[in-house]
Each structure stands twice: as C-alpha cells, then as structure tokens.
Image: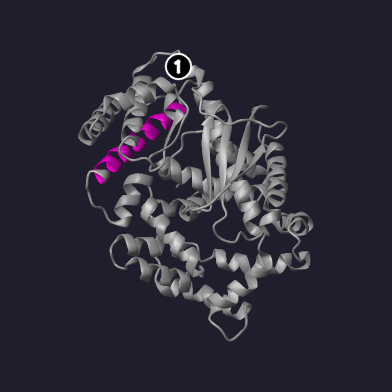
Amino acid sequence: MRVIPWAGAAIVATMIVGAGIVAAQSPRSPLDAIAQEYVFAVLALGEHDPAYVDAFYGPPEWRTRVHASKRSLSSIRADAIELTTALNAIAPSTDPLVRLRQEYLRKQIAALQARAEMIGGRKMSFDEESAALYDAVAPSHPDSYFQATLDDLARRLPGDGPLIDRLEAFRQHFVIPKDRLADVFTLAIAECRRRTLAHVALPADESFTVEYVTNKSWSGYNWYQGQFRSLIQVNTDLPIYIDRAVDLACHEGYPGHHVYNVLLEQQLVRSRGWVEMTVYPLFSPQSLIAEGSANYGIDVAFPGDERVRFERERLFPAAALDASRASEYSEVQALVDRLSYAWNEAARRYLNGERDRAATARWLTRFALMSPPRAEQRTRFMDDYRSYVINYNLGKDLVRAYIESKAGADSAARWPAFVDLLSSPRLPSGLR
C-alpha cells in the first residue's frame, strides 16, 4: 500500500484525537445533554455494527466508557425513544441555526432507532429503509428510462459488438497508468484545493493523507480524524479512468467530504460546542448531505467547461494520454452519467428480493454499462451499504436544486450558498 501525504503546505501524520473543546465541558442545557446522550447511543450502536460509526473525534474516554457498558440493541432503541421524547419537550428555538440543530437531532435519532431495529432483525423495503435512514426516497425508473440513454450512446459509439464492449474499448484509451496515479492525483488535488480556497476560509492547519488500497467495495473513502485532518483512501482494484482524478479529489477532498467535516468541526464543534457533530453515523440523514454535496461540489469547483480544459491541459499530459481527445471523452462520460439512477434501481430490486446477485450484476452491465468486474463490485457495495446508494445521485440532485434555487446560474454565487450548507446541520427534507 503506497501512502502519499497531502497537507497543503506540510506533511502530517493522521491520528484520532479528542476535540478538547468537548472533553472539558459538561452539558450546558437540556439540548446539550440530549446531544451528548445521542453521541453515546451512536457509539453504542457502533459496538453492534462496525460500519456504523464512520468518524468520531470526541473525547476518547467516551468510546472507552461505551465499550465497557456492553449495551444491548433493545437498550439503545429504548434510549432513542427517550431522547426523542425529551427533544420533543423542548420548545423550538428562536435562533434559526438552533432550530436546524433540533430537527437534525430528531431525524438523526430516528435513523439511529431504525438502524438498531434493522440490526435486530426488522425487515424493510428499499424505499422504507432509505426514508427511515436517509430522510429521502429516490424516484423509481423503468428499464425504458435508461434505454433512451443507451440508444444515444450506441449512436455515439458506433460498431457491431455489444454496447458495453464498445464502451470498454473506448475507455481503455483513458486509463491512468498505475505508475502515474500519484502524480495525476496530486495535480488534481492541488487544483481542487486552489479553487476551493479562493472561496472558502479553511483553518491553516487542515490537511489530509492519501492512501492507495485494494480489496474494497468502494472506489474512494474519506475517514475524518478530527483536528481538521482526514485519511483518504483510493481503491485501485479496477482501472481508474482519467475523469476519476477530479471526481475523487473533489468528492473526497476539496470541496467535498474533507471540507464538509472541517467546516462542521470549525463552525459547530469548536465555535458552538455542539458535541453531536463529533460523531458521524454512516447510516443517517447526514450521509445524503455529505455525499450529495461532495458530488455537486465537483460542479461548483469546475463550472462550465473549466473541468475539461483543466483535464486536457494538465491531467491528460500527466497521465501520458492523448489530450486531443479530452472533449470527446467528456462528452461520452456525460452520457454515461445519465445512467446513474440505474444503480438505485438495481439495488432496489436486489434488496427487495426481486433479483439475485448474478441477475443484478447482469442488469448493471446492460443498463448501467458497468463492466462485469465493476458490476460485481457494486453488488458487494449493496450487500455492505444497502440503500446508501441513493445518497450519491439523489443527494446530488437535491443539493443542486437547493443551491441553484439560491444562486441561480451565477457560478460565483453558488459558493456562499454551498459553504452555508456545509457549515450547518441541514437535513435532506430541508433541501426541498
């Protein structure tokens, strides 16, 4: 596993540390007390579900205390119900941000209860699960919805063989050689960071480290460590195409997950002492905001044709690819991106028991144009993360609609609205 430090100006070592602001404080209000008990409940559920706690940078002794308590699922569920009752007894705040906090805690606690019940054996349909965990339900599309895009791609990629084979043959010209991955990603990260810092005031000591890993069901992951630091992992199991450099640099880093978590720590944990933000339960409404903003952040950072220009001028040469084909690749990829909701549809039918794994992988190859190895990887993701898939595409669409309702077509005006979203405890239902 190759490790690349990325710290903007300095090399750093990542480590989990407690945010001192919460270590020395006792709850100052009933809402603060509920928030603290919520953190304990999330950590307790993480003892039953190793994937549940995606990040925690509160006091380390809290995790130790929870681990020693060995709380049962029924106890955690009962605590969630009690926390909801206590929260409902608090009058809505006159402070708009505190009102967002109250509603955020309400929905996060409800999702925690639902996840505890799922681990305990409760069965839900795909849509019931996504509503309970992510505060949203993705639209359902028939096969004909995707076929229209497949027909457009068939005309764009003429030939006699199956469309998936023609697309894979086309894409082979745009694979980043493994010995150039680090250089290409370093360039992409630097540009995403430069564009983000022109609009977002980040702490001087924010940083992250990049690792290249294998044998994962995802293509990239951000593990937030606290103290304005992240560990970002890039999966190299499958070929990495040139467009993924900007995608992952933005999504996992700037202005995506890394910036989102840094702003929450800076604005809500350190400035306001909101301890609930020191823990990130993966299967919760927060994930739709996180994934949706990370995906839409790519368009915020690279409006119009700025992305393809950067890729043509900087990334294609760094990857030793034919830069004269950058626009051609971008046009084809834009058509492929129109198939993103096929992932939702495959997961819905698979998790509802309408198709088995093999049939789901074949459907993804046909309607999402995923190579068989990539389709198999996606089915493993569905096993691990289930209805989480809606957070990427539906999340992006909800965030886009929310930001553009405030900023319109002015790409510069999108930044303030985007930063405001990342700095607040907003929920998916609050984006509509």
- Left or right, residue 332 beside residue 27: right
Q: Which of 262 and 240 is in front in this view?
A: 240
User: Magenta part of the protein: which range?
Assistant: 97-118
Image mark count: 1
Residue 275 position by quadrant: top left
Residue 388, visible in the rendered structure: yes
Where in the figure is residue 237, as x and y percent of width and height? 54, 57
Residue count near mark 1 (Cα–Cα under 10 Å), binned few <14, some 14–19, many ≥20 = some
The image quadrant of residue 44 is top left
Q: In which quarter of the image is residue 34?
A: top left
Tell me the amino acid under the disc marked 1: Ala
Reading the image, the residue beneath label 1 is 23
Residue at the (32%, 55%) spot, across then down? 127
Residue sitting nearer the eye, 358 or 58:
358
Instruction: Name above or below for residue 139 compared with residue 163.
Output: above
Residue at 51% of width from left, 69% of height from top? Answer: 371
Answer above or below: position of 250 versus 374.
above
Percent of width and height locating residue 233: 56, 45
Q: Main secondary structure of the magenta part?
A: helix
Q: Is residue 335 left or right of residue 398?
A: right
Task: Identify the residue at image location x=64%, y=27%.
Answer: 203
In the image: residue 371, left or right of residue 108: right
* Residue 325 magenta-highlighted: no
- Image location (x, y in percent) of residue 11: 68, 32
- Above or below residue 336? Residue 296 is above
Whether residue 408 is visible:
no
Residue 55 image offset from top left, x and y in percent: 46, 34
**What colouring style does the render use?**
one colour
SS at mark 1 in the image: helix
